[in-house]
Image (cartoon, rainbow, N blue to C red):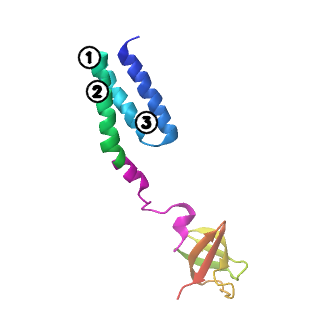
C-alpha cells in the first residue's frame, strides 16, 4: 500500500474522531496528516514525512487551536428559543393571577402567571415577560 494512502486513512480517522470529541486537536492532527499525504505523494522519504507531520501538528496545536478554542468559548450573541421571549411584550388574553392566565407573545398564546403572586392583571393589558418556567410565562405589567 502506498504511504500517501496510509496518511489519508489516518486523516479520515482523526477527522471522524474530532467530530465526536470537538476538541479541535484531533482535527488539526488530521489536517497535518493530509498535508503529509501530499508530501508522501510527491515521493519524499518516510523520515521527511514524519518531520512534516510533526511540524504541521505542532504548528496547528500551538497557533490554530488556541484561536479555535477562543471562538468556541465566546458567549452567544443572540438568544433563541424560549430565552428570546424574556423581555418581550405580551398581550393579556385572559385575566392573570398568581396561579393562571393566558397571554399572546409574538402571535403565540401562552399560559401565564403573575410574577408577583399578589397581582391580578386584567384582560387587554400589555405586560413584559420576566421569565419562562416550562410552558408558562411569568409576566409583570408595564409601567
Q: Residue at x 33, y 22 (%)?
A: 37
Residue position marked by numbered label 2 in the rendering: 52
Distance Cα–Cα, label 1 vs label 3: 24 Å
Q: Is residue 55 above or below residue 134?
A: above
Distance Cα–Cα, label 2 vs label 1: 10 Å
Would you say 27 lies left or right of 51 here?
right
Magenta-drawn stretch contains 85: yes
Q: Is residue 43 above or below residue 8?
A: above
Q: Secondary structure at mark 2?
A: helix
The quarter of the displayed image where residue 23 is located = top left
Residue position marked by numbered label 3 in the rendering: 26
Magenta-drawn stretch contains 118: no
Q: Which residues are magenta?
A: 67-87
Q: First in sequence: mark 1 or mark 3?
A: 3
Q: First in sequence: mark 2 or mark 1?
A: 1
Q: Residue at x 43, y 60 (%)?
A: 75
Residue 64 image offset from top left, x and y in percent = 32, 43
Q: Is residue 28 above or below residue 80?
A: above
Residue 73 image offset from top left, x and y in percent = 43, 55
Question: Answer yes or no: do the residues labelled 2 and 1 have beta carbons within 8 Å?
Answer: yes
Residue 125 image offset from top left, x and y in percent = 59, 84
Residue position marked by numbered label 1 in the rendering: 44
Amino acid at each position: 500500500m502506498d504511504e500517501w494512502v496510509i496518511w489519508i486513512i489516518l486523516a479520515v480517522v482523526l477527522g471522524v474522531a474530532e467530530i465526536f470529541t470537538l476538541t479541535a486537536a484531533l482535527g488539526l492532527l488530521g489536517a497535518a496528516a493530509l498535508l503529509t499525504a501530499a508530501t508522501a505523494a510527491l515521493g519524499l522519504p518516510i523520515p521527511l514525512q514524519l518531520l512534516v507531520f510533526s511540524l504541521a501538528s505542532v504548528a496547528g496545536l500551538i497557533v490554530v487551536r488556541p484561536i479555535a478554542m477562543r471562538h468556541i468559548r465566546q458567549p452567544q450573541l443572540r438568544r433563541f428559543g424560549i430565552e428570546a421571549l424574556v423581555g418581550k411584550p405580551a398581550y393579556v388574553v385572559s385575566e392573570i393571577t398568581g396561579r393562571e392566565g393566558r397571554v399572546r407573545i409574538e402571535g403565540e398564546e401562552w399560559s401565564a402567571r403573575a410574577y408577583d403572586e399578589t397581582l391580578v392583571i386584567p384582560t387587554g393589558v400589555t405586560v413584559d415577560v420576566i421569565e419562562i418556567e416550562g410552558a408558562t410565562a411569568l409576566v409583570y405589567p408595564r409601567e
